[in-house]
Image (cartoon, rainbow, N blue to C red):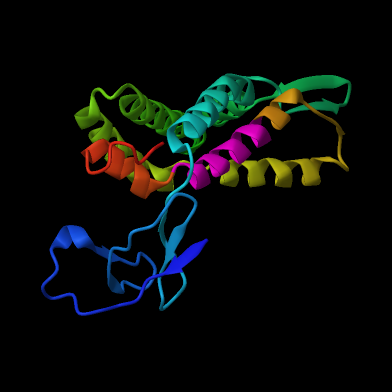
Amino acid sequence: MSNPVEPETLADLPLEDLVACHECDLLLRKPVIHPGEKALCPRCGYELYAHRHNVVNRSLALVLTALTLFIPANFLPIMQLHLLGQTSDDTVWSGVLGLYDSGMQGVAIVVFLCSMAIPLAKLMCQLVVLLAIRLNTGRRLGLLLYRTYHHLRDWGMLEVYFMGVLVAIVKLVDLAELTVGVGLFCFISLLLIQVWLEVVMSPHQVWSALSGEDPHAGD
């Protein structure tokens, strides 16, 4: 169920009762919503925030699944290339090493950060934040890490790396014999789980639970 939010006179309202639309910057009175509902901006229809069911436990399950897939997605072969009697297994990590050894150290560092280091850092931040809420301890650290997570969001570019892999497969399929490896399926699964996690882990509920405004916001 969606609850459009109606603008009203806001001059006398305290800041904690206000919310701004992230899409069109319309300032609104913060609505009260019930589990399963979401608040929408009346001007542009953007979702201001939602109250989802069992956010912490569902998000924890997704984070732990993503962490389980992280090593096979990055270190198992994405594809196997057969060319002129030679066979090579290509992984995300071997791609980083190949760039570094070929003299493109700067590009290798960027690929490593955006496809491996930052996605892992994001998952670890999410894990600690969710555990802080679940165990009701270390919420100050949870607030710091959740802010860090939001700063890192734009730098984890698994989808860009995935598009690069698809382009490479299309270009090489006519030149050599290609075999898709299990690492590619792990990589796709990791990407989809992270997208799902972005949907499930409602920022409004996480902030409310961490700050103590609503300790049960993640229930």
The front one of 16 and 71 is: 16
Residue 36 percent coordinates (x, y): 49, 51
The quarter holding residue 56 reads top left
The quarter holding residue 186 reads top right
Res. 103 in view? no
Residue occupying image coordinates x 31% and y 71%: 25
What stretch of residues is rendered in magenta?
187-201
Residue 141 percent coordinates (x, y): 23, 28
Res. 82 in view? yes
Residue occupying image coordinates x 41% and y 34%: 122
Q: Please, is residue 7 above or below residue 36 in the view?
A: below
Principal SS element in the magenta part? helix
Q: Say which quadrant the C terminus sits in.
A: top left
* Residue reaching furthest to the front: 34
Q: Please, is residue 51 above or below residue 191 in the view?
A: below
Horizontal relation, residue 26 to residue 197: left or right: left
The front one of 149 and 13 is: 13
Residue 164 percent coordinates (x, y): 65, 44
Q: Please, is residue 101 above or below residue 144 in the view?
A: above
- Asked whether residue 42 is drawn in magenta, I would say no
- Asked whether residue 188 is drawn in magenta, I would say yes
Residue occupying image coordinates x 54% and y 31%: 62
